[in-house]
Structures are given as structure tokens and as C-alpha cells.
Image (cartoon, helix red, strand yellow):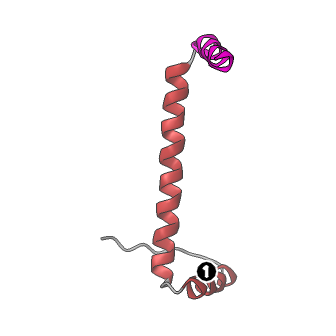
């Protein structure tokens, strides 16, 4: 496990501590959960970008399939 030093304004630090307290979790765990969410969002964006690249040039076929499915 690694240690990380983060510089925050006193106000932001106070608010994060209050948030952690309101959730009944240590500040360290709150930061860990926040980074986990950010990384999951990044991974989803990356997967979406890959799918967009794979589908480039195949939009017309996809629209045809949607129209056919709507008729059924």
C-alpha cells in the first residue's frame, strides 16, 4: 500500500472531514472510495471510447436494425 500527501485548502479539508464523519467513515476511507469511483468512471469512459471506435462507419447498419426491431 502507498501513502500519498495531498494539499488541500483548510476549508476543503474541513468539509471532507465533516462529510466523512456524517457517513461514519474515516477520512482515509472516504478518499479511497472517491478514487475508486473516479477510476470506475474513467474505465467506463475508456470502454465506451473503444466501442465507439469499433462501431465507426457502421451507424447506418445499426439504425437499420433498430428500425427493423421497432416494426416487430
Q: Residue at x 46, y 62 (%)?
A: 36
Q: Secondary structure at mark 1?
A: helix
Taking 6 as reference, is 70 above or below it?
above
- Which of the 4 quarters of the picture holds residue 61? top right
Q: 58 or 39: which is nearer to us?
A: 58
Taking 21 as reference, is 9 above or below it?
above
Residue at image mark 1: 16
Left or right of 12 on screen, residue 57:
left
- Which of the 4 quarters of the picture holds residue 2? bottom left
Q: 1 or 53: which is nearer to us?
A: 53
Residue 23: x, y in percent? 56, 83
Q: Residue at x 64, y 19 (%)?
A: 66
Q: Residue at x 66, y 83 (%)?
A: 15
Which residue is at the far left?
1
Which residue is at the far front?
72
Quarter of the figure that contains the C terminus: top right
Taking 34 as reference, is 64 above or below it?
above
Left or right of 62 on screen, residue 29:
left
Magenta stretch encompasses residue 42: no
Query: Count the marks: how many?
Result: 1
Q: Which residues are magenta?
A: 57-72
Taking 40 as reference, is 68 above or below it?
above
| Magenta-drawn stretch, dominant element (helix, strand or loop) | helix
Residue 26: x, y in percent? 48, 85
> How busy is the neighbourhood of tag 1: few (under 14 within 10 Å), some, or many (20 plus)?
some
Quarter of the figure that contains the N terminus: bottom left
Residue 20: x, y in percent? 56, 83
Amino acid at each position: 500500500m502507498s501513502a500519498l500527501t495531498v494539499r488541500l485548502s483548510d476549508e476543503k479539508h474541513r468539509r471532507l472531514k465533516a462529510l466523512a464523519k456524517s457517513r461514519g467513515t474515516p477520512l482515509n476511507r472516504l478518499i479511497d472510495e472517491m478514487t475508486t469511483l473516479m477510476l470506475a468512471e474513467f474505465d467506463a469512459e475508456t470502454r465506451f471510447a473503444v466501442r465507439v471506435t469499433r462501431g465507426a462507419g457502421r451507424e447506418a447498419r445499426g439504425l437499420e436494425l433498430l428500425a427493423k426491431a421497432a416494426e416487430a
